[in-house]
Image (cartoon, coloured by chain):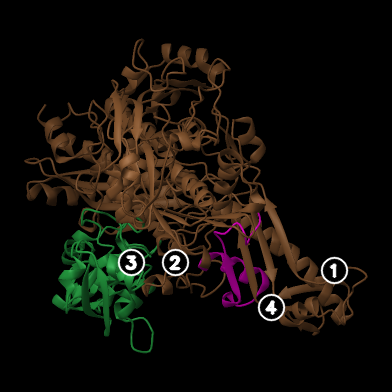
Chain colours: A brown, B green
C-alpha cells in the first residue's frame, strides 16, 4: 500500500491550484507604479567595430525617457565569470571583459548596443528604429577549429588568441594513457558533435528594476533559478550596491533548465537604470530575443578513443574536445566542459586510465553555458556512443560489453578525481531489461519490417555527479562561489511552519515535496508547512537550484534545521512534563516521555516557546526558529540504464520513437510522482536533442534558428509514453535523506539511447557502413547516411 | 486609439487600444488577466490560447480590435462556479500534467477545445491536437495522460506514474 503522506507519498501538488487557474505570479505579471519599459537595440552583425551610436533623433521620439549606450556604463563593472579554470600548463584561462552594453565592438548577433527606455514598450521599439549605427563589420569566427588557427580574427583584441584555455585532465596520467593505447588489443575511435541547443524554458526572461528613494534600496524582480547569487554577482561585481541595499526576487519562474542560473546584462541594466531614472524599468524578452541573448548549451566537437584488451576489458580512454564558449564567458561557462564533464568520463565502468583534453574557444556566437545536465550529457553521449561502436566492431552484444566492464565495488575512486559512494549498475540494467521487454524486441522488429520500416534498439548507461557541491573541493577547482545551501525553519506560535529555503522551485514542486520531509520528521500534517523561496529579503543566503541539488543539498539543510528545532522543542516538552529531555520522543505530532503515557502536543510546545510563562528561561531562549547551512561532503551519483526503440522509414530517413524506458537509481525518493515527472521531462529534452533540435549559425555568424519556426522544439506527437522506474535504490551515504537528485538524469541518459537505436536499425538493413550520425538525426541526415 | 468592447469570462470589458494591440496584450495589460501567457512571437507555442466565441484561438495572433463584440473565455474563467477545478483542470493536477505552469493555461484551453470537438480522443488524436502547444517540462507524458483521464478514459495502465 503506497503511503498517503510524508516521505515516499505522492500528494497532489499544491502549487498547481494557482497555475491551473491563471493565478500564478510570474515576473511579467509584475507591474509597478510609474513603470517604464526598455527595449534593447541588438547587433545584427556577428562581429564589428562600433564606431558610432547616434541616438539624437531617437531621443526626441514620443515617450522616450532616456537612451543608454555603452558610454553610460563606463564606471560600471562588467558581468563577472564565476569559475576560473587553470589550463594544462598551470596558467589561468583567458578572461575577457563582458560589458553590460557593447563598448567598442559587437561580438555576436544579439549583443546589446543601446537600451531605449520609454513610457510604453511600443514607443521604445519605435525609437530604436531611429537610432543610427555606424558598425564596421569584421570577419566573424564561427567554427571552433578555425577560430584557434593562427591568424584567425580575434573575438577579443586584448587576448592573445581565441583559445580560452587548453585543459588536460588528469595531465599527469597522459603518458600512461598513451602507453596503454600502444599496447591495446583493440582501439575504437569516434568523432562526434554534441549539438548546440537553446534551453527554451517556455517563460522568456523578464527583469523589472525598482528603486526606493526613501530607503536607497534597489529591488530586482527577475526570472532566476538563484536570486541570492544574482544579488551577490550584480551587487558586488557590476553595480557596486551593497547586499543590504539590494533585494532580488524570483517569483514563479516558468522553467529554467540552466539558462536562468546566469547573471545577464538585462538584469544589471534594469537595476541600474531604475536608480538613474528613479522609476521602475521593465524588460520582457521576446522569444526571438531569447534565441540571441539566453546562454546556449552543449556545442562540443569531440574525438574519443577507447582501448580494450583481448578480453574486451576497457583499458584506457582518451578524448579531445573543442568546447564553444561563445563571445563572452557566461557565469559558469568555463566549468561545464571541464569539471562537470571530464570528471564523468569514467561513466559506469572500470576504465583504469583516462585522459581528457578540452580546448575552450571564443567565437562570434551567443555565450554557451550550462543546460540541463551541463557537461554530463556531453560526457555520457561520447562514452556510450563509443562503447556501442566498439561492441559492433568486436561483434559482441553491447549490453554484455557494458556489464562486463561495470564498476561493482563501492565506494569507487575513479581515475578522474571523483569517488562514487554507492550504485548498483547491474541492478538498473536488470531492471531495464525487464521494463523495456528486451525479450520481445525480435517480434516487434519483425512487425515493423512487415510494415516496411526498420526497427532498432539502443541501450546506454549513465552516471552523473549531482548535489553540487563540496565548497572546499570546488574552490580548489576554480569556483568563485561556495555551493552550500541554507534553510530557516520558522515555527510559529500556533505550530504552523514557514521554511525559508535557498533552493528555488521553477517546476520541480518544492512547495509540495519539501513539506513531506518535515512532516515526516515531526509527525504533523503537511498542510501546516509552507515553503518560502525566491526572495533575498525573506531567507538567508542561498545558492539556488541547478545541478539536481535542491533536495540533496537544500533538503539536507532543511533536515539539519529541523533537527535543531526538534532538539529545542524536546527541551521545552521535557520542562512542560517535568521529565528529562533525553527521555523525550517525537511521534505523531506529539512529544512523549519514553516508557510512560505522558505526552504533550506539538502546538502546546510551540505556544510555550512564544508565550514562555512556564518555560526554562534560564536554559534556553524563547522562540522556535533555527537556521542551518549544509555543505555536502561529496557529490551524489545518480545512475541508470536507458533503452530506446525506434522505427526508421527507409524511404525518407524519418525516425520515430516507438518505446522509451528508463531505470534510474536516485537513492531514496521523497515524492515518486514528481520524480517521474522530472524524468519524463528530461527524456523529452533528450529526444529533442537527438532528433530535432540544433542551433545553427551560418559562416557569417547569422543565427539561422532564431525562432520556433526554425528551431525544432519537441511536440507532443514527437514522443511516446515513457516507461520509467526508480525502484532500484542505493541510498546516498553522505546526506541525511540518502537522496541523489533526479532533475537532469533524463536529459543526460536519453540522447545516446536514441542514436544507438537508429544505428542499430540501419545495421539491421545491412547499412553497416553507417557507424555514426551527428545529432539531430533529421530525416535528411539519416537518409543521406543510409544512401552514402 | 480605438475603443473595443467584448465580453470576457462573462463580464463586459472595454478599453482604448492601438490598432496594433494584440488580444493577449489587451487581456494582460488592460484587463490584468495575467493567466494568459506569451511564450513566443511566431504563434507557435500556444501559451496564449483562449476561447473566442467558443473556438480556441492564439491570443497573440489576433488583434484586440478583431475581438470587438466577441465572447472571450480565459483560464481565469473556466473553473467551476464554486471556484473548484473543472474536470480538465482537475485531471491536470491529478496526473501531474504541469510543472512550471507557464504553458499550462494554454494547454488547458486547448484540451478543453479538443474534448468539446472530440469527447473521446485517442492518444494519437490528442498528440496531434497539441501540435500548437509546446511544453518544455513534462515531455508531454502526463499532459496526454491527463487529457485522456479528463475524457473519462482509464489511464491506470499507462506506463509509470
Please tell me whether mark 2 or mark 4 is closer to you in this view.
2
The C terminus of chain A sits in image quarter: top left
- Badge 1: chain ID: A
Please tell me whether mark 1 or mark 2 is closer to you in this view.
2
Q: Which residue is mark 2?
A: A25
Please tell me whether mark 2 or mark 3 is closer to you in this view.
2
Does the magenta run of residues contain A484? no
Looking at the image, do the residues carrying marks 1 and 2 touch, with CB atoms under 8 Å apart? no
- Badge 3: chain ID: B
Do marks 1 and 4 share a subunit? yes
Does the magenta run of residues contain A514? yes
Q: Secondary structure at mark 1?
A: loop
Q: Which residue is mark 1?
A: A621
Disc 3 from disc 4: Cα separation: 34 Å
Left or right of A88, for residue A29:
left
Residue at the far right: name it. A618
Q: Secondary structure at mark 2?
A: loop
Disc 1 from disc 4: Cα separation: 17 Å
Judge whether A439 appears above or below A75 on screen: below
Q: Which residue is mark 3?
A: B104
Q: Secondary structure at mark 3?
A: helix
Which residues lie in the magenta part? A512-540
- Badge 2: chain ID: A
Judge whether A19 appears above or below B86 on screen: above
Amino acid at each position: 500500500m503506497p503511503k498517503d503522506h510524508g516521505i515516499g507519498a505522492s500528494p497532489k501538488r499544491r502549487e498547481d491550484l494557482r497555475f491551473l487557474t491563471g493565478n500564478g505570479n510570474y515576473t511579467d505579471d509584475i507591474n509597478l507604479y510609474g513603470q517604464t519599459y526598455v527595449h534593447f537595440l541588438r547587433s545584427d552583425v556577428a562581429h564589428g567595430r562600433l564606431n558610432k551610436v547616434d541616438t539624437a533623433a531617437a531621443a526626441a521620439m514620443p515617450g522616450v525617457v532616456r537612451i543608454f549606450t555603452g558610454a553610460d556604463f563606463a564606471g560600471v563593472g562588467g558581468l563577472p565569470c564565476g569559475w576560473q579554470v587553470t589550463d594544462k600548463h598551470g596558467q589561468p584561462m583567458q578572461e575577457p571583459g563582458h560589458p553590460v552594453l557593447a563598448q567598442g565592438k559587437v561580438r555576436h548577433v544579439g549583443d546589446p548596443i543601446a537600451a531605449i527606455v520609454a513610457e510604453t514598450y511600443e514607443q521604445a521599439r519605435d525609437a530604436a528604429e531611429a537610432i543610427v549605427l555606424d558598425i564596421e563589420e569584421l570577419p566573424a569566427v564561427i567554427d571552433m577549429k578555425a577560430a584557434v588557427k593562427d591568424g584567425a580574427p580575434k573575438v577579443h583584441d586584448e587576448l592573445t588568441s581565441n583559445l580560452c584555455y587548453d585543459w588536460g585532465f588528469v595531465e599527469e596520467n597522459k603518458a600512461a594513457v598513451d602507453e596503454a593505447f600502444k599496447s591495446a588489443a583493440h582501439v575504437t575511435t569516434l568523432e562526434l558533435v554534441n549539438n548546440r541547443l537553446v534551453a527554451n524554458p517556455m517563460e522568456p526572461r523578464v527583469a523589472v528594476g525598482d528603486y526606493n528613494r526613501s530607503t536607497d534600496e534597489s529591488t530586482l524582480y527577475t526570472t532566476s533559478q538563484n536570486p541570492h547569487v544574482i544579488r551577490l554577482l550584480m551587487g558586488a561585481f557590476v553595480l557596486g550596491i551593497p547586499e543590504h541595499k539590494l533585494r532580488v526576487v524570483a517569483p514563479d519562474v516558468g522553467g529554467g533548465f540552466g539558462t536562468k542560473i546566469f547573471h545577464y546584462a538585462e538584469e544589471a541594466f534594469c537595476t541600474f537604470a531604475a536608480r538613474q531614472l528613479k522609476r521602475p524599468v521593465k524588460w520582457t524578452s521576446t522569444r526571438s530575443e531569447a534565441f540571441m541573448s539566453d546562454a546556449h548549451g552543449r556545442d562540443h566537437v569531440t574525438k574519443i578513443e577507447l582501448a580494450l584488451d583481448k578480453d574486451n576489458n576497457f583499458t584506457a580512454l582518451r578524448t579531445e574536445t573543442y568546447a564553444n564558449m561563445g563571445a563572452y564567458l557566461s557565469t559558469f561557462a568555463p566549468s561545464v566542459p571541464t569539471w562537470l564533464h571530464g570528471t564523468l568520463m569514467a561513466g559506469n565502468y572500470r576504465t583504469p586510465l583516462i585522459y581528457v583534453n578540452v580546448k575552450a574557444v571564443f567565437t562570434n556566437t551567443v555565450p554557451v553555458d550550462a543546460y540541463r545536465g551541463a557537461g554530463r550529457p556531453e560526457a555520457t553521449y561520447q562514452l556510450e556512443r563509443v562503447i556501442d561502436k566498439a561492441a559492433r566492431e568486436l561483434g559482441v552484444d553491447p549490453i554484455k560489453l557494458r556489464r562486463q566492464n561495470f564498476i561493482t565495488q563501492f565506494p569507487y575512486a575513479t581515475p578522474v578525481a571523483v569517488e562514487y559512494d554507492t550504485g548498483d549498475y547491474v541492478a538498473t540494467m536488470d531492471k531495464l531489461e525487464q521494463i523495456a521487454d528486451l525479450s520481445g524486441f525480435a517480434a516487434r522488429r519483425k512487425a515493423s519490417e512487415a510494415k516496411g520500416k526498420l526497427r532498432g534498439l539502443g541501450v546506454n548507461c549513465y552516471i552523473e555527479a549531482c548535489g553540487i557541491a563540496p565548497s572546499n573541493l570546488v574552490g580548489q577547482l576554480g569556483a568563485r562561489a561556495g555551493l552550500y545551501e541554507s534553510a530557516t525553519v520558522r515555527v510559529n506560535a500556533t505550530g504552523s511552519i514557514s521554511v525559508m529555503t535557498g533552493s528555488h522551485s521553477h517546476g520541480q514542486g518544492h512547495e509540495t515535496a519539501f513539506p513531506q520531509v518535515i512532516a515526516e520528521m515531526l509527525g504533523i500534517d503537511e498542510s501546516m508547512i509552507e515553503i518560502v523561496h525566491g526572495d533575498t529579503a525573506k531567507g538567508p543566503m542561498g545558492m539556488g537550484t541547478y545541478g539536481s541539488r535542491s533536495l540533496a543539498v537544500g533538503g539536507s539543510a532543511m533536515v539539519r534545521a529541523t533537527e535543531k528545532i526538534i532538539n529545542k522543542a524536546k527541551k521545552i516538552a521535557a520542562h512542560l512534563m517535568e521529565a528529562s529531555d533525553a527521555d523525550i520522543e517525537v511521534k505523531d505530532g506529539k512529544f512523549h516521555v519514553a516508557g510512560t503515557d505522558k505526552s504533550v502536543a506539538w502546538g502546546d510546545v510551540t505556544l510555550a516557546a512564544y508565550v514562555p510563562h512556564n518555560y526554562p528561561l534560564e536554559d534556553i531562549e524563547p522562540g522556535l526558529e533555527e537556521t542551518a547551512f549544509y555543505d555536502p561532503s561529496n557529490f551524489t551519483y545518480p545512475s541508470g540504464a536507458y533503452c530506446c526503440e525506434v522505427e526508421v522509414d527507409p524511404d525518407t530517413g524519418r525516425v520515430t520513437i516507438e518505446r522509451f524506458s528508463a531505470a534510474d537509481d536516485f537513492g531514496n525518493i521523497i515524492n515518486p510522482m514528481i520524480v517521474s515527472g522530472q524524468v519524463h521531462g528530461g527524456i523529452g529534452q533528450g529526444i529533442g536533442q537527438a532528433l530535432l533540435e540544433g542551433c545553427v549559425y551560418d559562416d557569417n555568424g547569422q543565427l539561422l534558428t532564431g525562432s520556433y519556426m526554425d528551431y525544432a522544439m519537441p511536440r507532443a506527437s514527437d514522443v511516446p509514453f515513457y516507461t520509467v522506474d526508480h525502484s532500484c535504490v542505493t541510498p546516498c551515504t553522505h546526506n541525511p535523506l540518502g537522496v541523489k537528485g533526479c532533475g537532469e538524469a533524463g536529459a543526460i541518459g536519453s540522447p545516446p539511447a536514441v542514436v544507438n537505436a537508429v544505428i542499430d536499425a540501419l545495421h539491421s538493413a545491412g547499412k553497416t557502413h553507417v557507424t555514426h550520425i551527428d545529432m539531430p538525426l533529421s530525416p535528411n541526415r539519416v537518409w543521406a547516411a543510409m544512401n552514402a | 486609439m480605438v475603443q473595443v468592447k467584448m465580453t470576457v469570462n462573462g463580464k463586459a470589458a472595454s478599453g482604448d487600444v492601438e490598432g496594433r494591440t494584440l488580444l493577449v496584450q489587451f487581456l494582460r495589460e488592460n484587463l490584468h488577466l495575467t493567466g494568459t501567457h506569451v511564450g513566443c512571437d511566431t504563434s507557435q507555442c500556444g501559451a496564449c490560447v483562449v476561447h473566442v466565441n467558443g473556438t480556441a484561438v492564439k491570443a497573440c495572433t489576433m488583434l484586440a480590435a478583431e475581438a470587438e463584440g466577441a465572447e472571450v473565455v480565459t483560464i481565469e474563467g473556466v473553473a467551476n462556479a464554486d471556484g473548484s477545478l473543472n474536470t480538465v483542470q482537475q485531471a491536470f493536477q491529478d496526473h501531474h500534467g504541469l510543472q512550471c505552469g507557464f504553458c499550462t493555461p494554454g494547454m488547458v484551453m486547448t484540451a478543453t477545445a479538443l474534448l468539446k470537438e472530440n469527447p473521446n480522443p485517442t492518444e494519437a488524436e490528442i498528440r496531434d491536437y497539441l501540435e500548437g502547444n509546446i511544453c518544455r517540462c513534462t515531455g508531454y507524458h502526463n499532459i496526454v495522460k491527463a487529457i485522456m483521464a479528463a475524457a473519462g478514459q482509464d489511464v491506470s495502465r499507462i506506463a509509470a506514474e
